[in-house]
Image: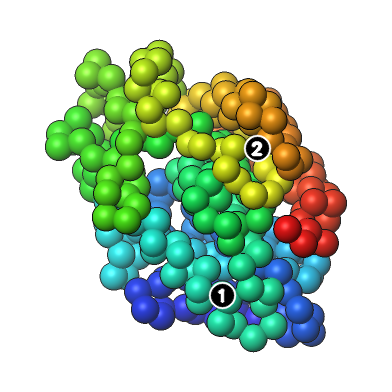
Amino acid sequence: MIMKEVADNGLIADLFTDTTFQSRKAIIMLGGSEGGKVWSSIRIRRPIELLVQQGYSVLSLAYFKAQGLPYSLEEIPLEYFEKAFNWLSAQKGIVANKYVVLGGSKGAEAALLLASKYSQVKAVIAFSPSCVVWQGIPEKRFEIGKDVKSSWSYKGESLPFLAYPPSVKKMDLLLLRLRKMHEEALQNISGTSNAEIKVENIQGPILLISGERDQLWPATNMSKMIMNRLKANMFDYKYEHIVYQTGHNGIIINRDCWRKIFTFLKAYYASFEG
């Protein structure tokens, strides 16, 4: 496996590949609110190694908290990710414009949102996903109620988002006791509807993976909301939700989870021509 650091036109990433495969599809991996190129970490890199062995190229992409990128997760332009699509399409041996986006937590929110807007995304794998665009996370988390902004922007406009309830407590923010806060926010029916990700516009299969004991946000319930929206819109592609009895990050180190991901990719993406 070869790793190449990418710092091109403002793009910050690591590309993992194997030149013995002449034609390789690419998987873009996005981390969560920890920022940086989290999937590049030696501690959790094994799935990347296995994906490369199976003939994929993998782009571990930072979108904030890295050199030259925003430090807060607020109004991150989706056009930044479009740069990644364009960069990959220019790389020798990589199949252009047929990408998987795999994200965890806020990265899962981004993955579903990107796939709903960009036809270059042909499959989504979402760990601990969100069904809505949430308000952004400032540099100092305990100031999260001040000057509230969306997490994402598109074409120069802040995307509609679901705000946290005014009852949120500073200590809960500092200690990441956030599930109740998100559950309370989702009770705002009109706000939730306005911020919902239009997952029915995705042009490929979707795999959602959640932990029932998630304490950061109600990923299992939000995954069910996504599944219901897809069903209501008679979604044309394969969509599946897998639930584990674990917490927010426990699924990432679950071997059975990765076996199911490899099976999903082989069945619905490896030969996908859409």
Can I make out residue 35 in this image?
A: yes
Q: Which residue is mark 1?
A: 88
Label located before the other in sequence (2 or 1): 1
- Packing grade of label 1 (10 A; few <14, some 14-19, many >=20) is many
Q: Position of residue 68 (x, y in %)?
A: 29, 70
Q: Is residue 142 visible?
A: no
Amino acid type at image mark 1: Leu
Q: Residue at x 56, y 38 (%)?
A: 199
**Number of marks:** 2
Secondary structure at badge 2 equals strand
Marker disc for residue 208: 2
Q: Nearer the viewer, mark 2 or mark 1?
A: 1
Q: Inspect the image, locate mark 2, and give the three-letter code of the amino acid beneath it.
A: Leu
Q: Is residue 71 above or below residue 82?
A: above
- Residue 178, compared with residue 64, is above or below; it is above
Tell me if mark 2 has few (under 14), some (14-19) or many (20+) residues whose alpha carbon lies within 10 angstroms of its own: many
